Image (spheres, grey):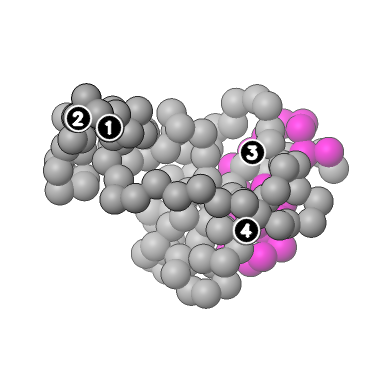
Amino acid sequence: AESLEPLVHGRGRQYNQSDLDEAHFGVHEEILLARGFQVNAQWTGVCTGVALAWLESGKVDAVVVTAGKEASGFGAPQPLICRTAEEVLQGRRVKPSLSPSLEVLDDVKSDGSIKRLLYCGVGCSVQALRA
């Protein structure tokens, strides 16, 4: 993935012995600490809150989240392409199991109305998506 970073981000990681953020987190402009306030969130709902805000403000056309098939959210996690706040809320809570989140990318690619996508996923799937 590192060899693709200049193509995707316009530059590779900047390594500096006094600041190893990019060595650990990849290419970025800024790292922020956030605290959420979502009701019924597992912790504070930061990811859900960001996804809702970006979708409702029109910054993205769709959001990919991991939804659970059971009411608890833990059973059979499945990726969901969200166009509404109600759909985003189906992705609340941590799912402590693997989800085939990248399998929806063909659906996203074939949907001409999705130009800007927010992808919520674990680090390894985000790295694969970015590559």
Query: Could you tell me the amino acid type at mark 4?
Result: Gly
Between disc 3 and disc 4, the foreground one is: 4
Q: Is residue 96 above or below residue 34?
A: above
Q: CA distance from mark 3 to mark 4?
A: 20 Å
Mark 1 or mark 4: which comes first in sequence?
A: 1
Look at the numbered discs 3 and 1 and tell me whether their residues touch, using CB distance below 8 Å: no
Q: Quadrant of residue 52?
A: bottom right
Query: Could you tell me the amino acid type at mark 2?
Result: Asn
Q: Disc number at residue 78?
A: 3
Q: Name the element at disc 2.
A: loop
In this rendering, would 111 be left or right of 82? Answer: left
Between disc 2 and disc 4, the foreground one is: 2
Q: Disc number at residue 49?
A: 4
In this rendering, would 41 be left or right of 16? Answer: right
Q: Disc number at residue 44?
A: none
At a point 60% along the width and 26% down the height, the residue shown is: 98
Q: Name the element at disc 1.
A: loop
| Residue that carries the numbered disc 1 in the rendered image | 19
Q: Disc number at residue 16?
A: 2
In this rendering, would 68 be left or right of 119? Answer: right
Look at the numbered discs 2 and 1 and tell me whether their residues touch, using CB distance below 8 Å: yes
Q: Name the element at disc 4.
A: helix
Is 39 or 70 nearer to us in this picture? 39
In this rendering, would 2 be left or right of 78? Answer: left
